[in-house]
Image (tube, rainbow, N blue to C red):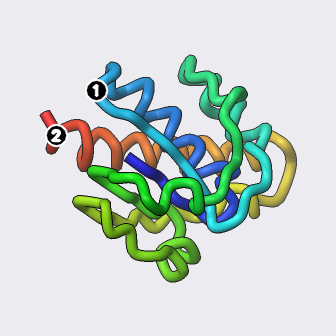
Amino acid sequence: MLFLCTHNSARSQMAEGLLRALGGGRFEAHSAGTEATHVRPLAIRAMAELGIDIAGQDSKTLDRYLDQPFDYVITVCDDANESCPIFPNARMRMHWSLPDPSRATGTDAEQLAVFRKVRDELRHHIERELLQTTR
């Protein structure tokens, strides 16, 4: 499974961590972006609340994955969905339109609440669309 986002800093990183944790070793999870930046500290904090450590994950570009086979390639932001290349070795392509939590404003607590909301939406998608359909 490959999760794609624009900067590979929050949504795709959280999705990668969630699938690894929830999949019980059944899946090989990766994430990438059309650009690489860094994993956002608030994404790391939101995931840590679930006992999932993504602090060691790296932000990377999708170029390294273009020739690799994937069962699923999932874009988690609209920009990546529009600019995402075709993955000829992907069996299934999906899109989950999620807001960018890194654009949240307000206090640290208010921003963290946005990251939690996106994390929980990702978890819902993963449980409903990946874990239940690939048993």
Quadrant location of residue 5?
A: bottom right
Residue assigned mark 2: 134
The x and y percentages for residue 114 are 65, 50
User: On residue 59, which mark appears?
Assistant: none
Amino acid on which disc 1 is placed: Arg
The x and y percentages for residue 31 are 54, 48
- Relative placement, left or right, of 15 versus 57 is left
10 Å neighbourhood of mark 2: few (<14), some, or many (≥20)? few
- Relative placement, left or right, of 89 versus 64 is left
The x and y percentages for residue 22 are 37, 27
Residue at 47 percent across and 53 percent down: it is 3
Residue assigned mark 1: 26
What is the secondary structure assignment of the residue under circle 1?
loop
Taking 98 as reference, is 2 above or below it? above
Quote the CA–CA distance across marks 1 and 2: 10 Å
Quadrant location of residue 63?
A: bottom right
10 Å neighbourhood of mark 1: few (<14), some, or many (≥20)? few
What is the secondary structure assignment of the residue under circle 2?
loop
Residue at 34 percent across and 49 percent down: it is 125
Residue at 15 percent across and 44 percent down: it is 133
Report the front residue among 88 and 123: 88
| Residues at circles 1 and 2 in contact by the CB criterion of under 8 Å | yes
Residue at 57 percent across and 55 percent down: it is 64
Taking 82 as reference, is 122 above or below it? above
- Relative placement, left or right, of 76 versus 25 is right
Report the front residue among 63 and 13: 63
Amino acid on which disc 2 is placed: Thr
Q: Which quadrant holds the C terminus?
A: top left
